[in-house]
Amino acid sequence: MKLAIIGTGKIVHEAFYALSFLPSIEITAIYARPHSREKAEALAREHAVPEVYTDYAELLESSEADTVYIGLVTSAHYDYAKRALLAGKNVILEKPFTETLGEARELIQLAKENGLFLFEAITVLHSIVYEKMLESIASIGRVRMALLNYSQYSSRYDAYREGKVLPAFDPACGASSLSDLNVYNIHYAAALFGMPDEVHYFPNRGFNGMDVSGVLVLRYPDFNAVCTAAKDSDSPSFVCIQGEDGCMRIDGKPNVAPNLDITRVQKGKPPVPDAAGAMQRPVTEEHIENHPDHRMVQEFRDFATIIEQSDYEARDALLDETETVMKILERAKA
């Protein structure tokens, strides 16, 4: 993969660090708008990137890159991705994918019609923890409840409390706790359970109308998935999937998934009383540790492999999941 980096923000710095563990991916160029040229040049020097562009059309026409990674605000995703696809470039698009379901569907159709690769950079789907959850979910019996929380006091929230609206709290940039943080929870639900029957969102709104925190309820045929996220407050983050015969739990931020604990009921063994006087079923416990070099490394590795192997089936499976998430987001916003 020959990759062009689009943007100079915080997520781009993380991407550069993650890509340092993947020398097989060649970074050929970086793009920034003219006012951010100095930032792009500094990143290019630091990471030995040969070309710096401030004209996106020129990059798409002249760069050796076969793939662009777009790490811009959500409101810019659709336009930059569409222009890249029309220029014959593969696209890795930061989460959330686009602002609307219609935009997402148009990009997906464009990629498929032109035999190109289009991915959402969502770390949730690229880790040993997620793979183990898929493998093990049947072993915890019929799912009865899913509780997911990603709460992280934003480094920009102090400014917001003083009335200053930075891009992370600007609805015009596509920012919200729903799309910035809860989207990770939604990806777990969509990947594990598919499209829910009902979507209900209860936001806490700031002075400019942005949802700074909120609770999303996804109603499946016989259970609810409750997804909470906050940029205005902190709490321990987790993912917990409860079944009739066990549960799976991630203790930590859903986008990192540092570990997974799987508890399974030992069938055929009698329950025993606990200290509270309740009867507890005997269980077995399995613990999985996830120690990635960086949370974004595996997704870039997977994208490069899919492109190199021309694995359109894998592309389509990921795009189907992304489209489900976009359906949920659109219904939640409504």
Image: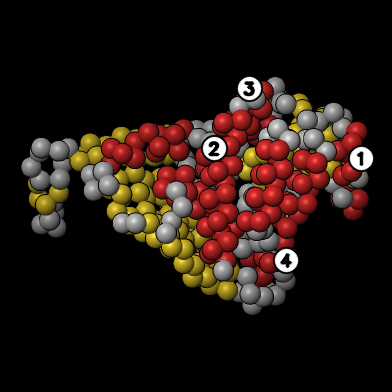
Q: Amino acid at mark 1?
A: Glu
Q: Quadrant of residue 162?
A: bottom right
- Position of 86 with respect to 271 (left or right) is right
> What kind of element bears circle 4?
helix
Above-or-below relation of 147 to 292: below
Name the residue that disc number 1 marks. 58
> What kind of element bears circle 2?
helix
Percent across and percent down for residue 250 are 41, 45
Instruction: Quote the CA–CA distance across marks 1 and 3.
Output: 28 Å
Q: Amino acid at mark 4?
A: Ala
Quadrant for the N terminus, please.
top right
Q: Is residue 97 in view from this perspective?
A: yes
Name the residue that disc number 3 marks. 309
Instruction: Quote the CA–CA distance across marks 1 and 2.
Output: 32 Å
Percent across and percent down for residue 257 are 47, 42
Instruction: Quote the CA–CA distance across marks 3 and 4.
Output: 38 Å
Viewer-closest of 135 and 153: 135
> What kind of element bears circle 1?
helix
- Position of 96 with respect to 46 (left or right) is left
Q: Quadrant of residue 49?
A: top right
Percent across and percent down for residue 320 are 55, 43
Query: Alpha-carbon neighbours of circle 2 within 10 Å: few (<14), some, or many (≥20)?
Result: few
In the rendered structure, which disc, 1 or 2, sits on the residue that comes first in sequence?
1
- Residue at left offset 54%, top offset 52%: 325
Query: Alpha-carbon neighbours of circle 3 within 10 Å: few (<14), some, or many (≥20)?
Result: few
In the rendered structure, which disc, 3 or 4, sits on the residue that comes first in sequence?
4
